[in-house]
Amino acid sequence: MKKFTFALLFLFIFANSITAQNCQNPLNNTAFQNGFNQIAIQQTNQKKLDKATEFVNSNCLLAAQVKNIAQLFTEDSYRLAFCEAAYAHTFDQVNFYDVYDAFSAFSFAFRLNDYIHSVTPAVVTTTTTTTPTVIATQSSVPTYPNVAYPSSANYTGKKGCAGPVLNDASFKAVAQNVFIQPTDESKQLAIQNASAQNCLDFAQVMKLVSLLKSEDFRLQLLEYTFSRVYDQEHYQSGIVLFTNTQLQNSWTVYAANFLAPPPPPPVVCVVTTADFNSIMQSIRAKSFPADKLSLIDVLSKDRCFNVEQIKTIGKEFTFGSDKLEVFKKLYAKCPDQNNYYKLVDELTFSSEKDELNNFIKNGGK
């Protein structure tokens, strides 16, 4: 915001010198920051105004705190409405002229000045008439690191949002809103809101995140916004935001895992006790060994019997040759094959035992 030096400043000071203050104990920094954060997380100017008005009406603020809250709004009309409500609850009204810097247009600063003088007693003073002088400097605008930013034009890789990417004019407004926030914490909230409401490409996210001083905060914001970034496969460019090698590695590992997460652990196939009891009833209902073997052949396709369950199934067969066939059929999906040797003693003849032992040694072949 342009810096204002008003010749009418002396009127402001005199007016405040005879205006009774409406608060005596300004809010401490911790309590102010808590209230500030609650205002900052609101997603529209109107909701911010409602929350800010409620906050200021029940507290006594310093002029600098009023200015910080005013900078949360993206439009001067909302800033003006808030500042008018906050004036009566400002401890150091003599410093209220500092709040003028929160506005992006001179006209709104003058409107606030007119409002203040409308609610303070008129001051009669003799003074030499001079022409008011307004000294203005160029508006502060965000600047970004001079690095190579990736282009999302013609991007065809993995996307976190469908597009279109936020246009340049709208992005400048978003960036300006982030830039004017007074703390890294409030900048974080502004970036989170922008990411939730817009489709940003990775270059835009990099620029916004670069406005944070803390590299730890930068990492948190990159991770928070990444799921909605348009051109996610450009994530490698983000390492230039960090001077710390560990943070660079943390970022690339996070993004790579997000795009290609490690495979889930294998699902252990289990036949529950209830399922097994039902299966045993079906096996016992068969009158002939051949029918039982046919059923087991079907079950072996998608059931994973453990060794104890297989042993129980084997007892349903009288002949060792049938038991051996059952043991072979159910080997492939058995979850505890390391215990399969326990089934050898379920066989009677040494030839059958040797055959099963060799079968186990050869991995079921």
Image (spheres, grey):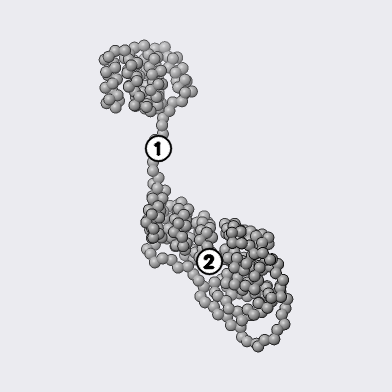
Q: In terms of image quadrants, where is residue 284?
A: top left
Distance of label 1 from label 2 (alpha carbons): 47 Å
Relative to residue 164, is residue 324 depicted above or below? above
Query: In this view, which residue lies farthest toward the bottom?
Result: 128
Q: Nearer the viewer, residue 357 or 105?
A: 357
Q: Nearer the viewer, residue 155 or 278?
A: 278
Quadrant in the rendering for residue 319: top left
Q: How many marks?
A: 2
Residue 337 at x, y percent in the picture: 35, 26
Quarter in which the C terminus is drawn: top left
Q: Amino acid at mark 2?
A: Ile
Q: Dot 2 corresponds to which residue? A: 180
Q: Position of residue 359 (x, y in %)?
A: 28, 23
Above or below — where is 246 with respect to 130? above
**Disc 2, SS:** loop
**What mark, if any, has residue 245 been given in the picture?**
none
Find residue 265 and name its label: 1
Q: Is residue 123 above or below residue 85?
A: below
Q: Residue at the location (61% across, 81% down)?
A: 7
From the top left corner, tell me how far across and down residue 204 is, in percent.
Answer: 45, 61
Residue 33 appears left or right of 168? right
Q: Is residue 110 left or right of residue 145?
A: right
Mark 1, Cα crowd under 10 Å, few <14 / some 14-19 / many 20+, is few
Kindly indicate the quadrant of the structure image that contains residue 42: bottom right
Viewer can see residue 74: yes
Give the residue drawn at x 63%, y 62%.
Answer: 27
Residue 45 seen anywhere in this rendered image of the structure = no
Q: Is residue 352 left or right of residue 93?
A: left
| Spot occupied by residue 100 in the image (x, y as percentages of width and height) | 60, 72
Q: Please give the name of the residue rendered at 57% of the width and 72% of the height, measured from the top-left corner.
A: 101
Residue at the location (54% across, 72% down)?
A: 1
Secondary structure at badge 1 equals: loop
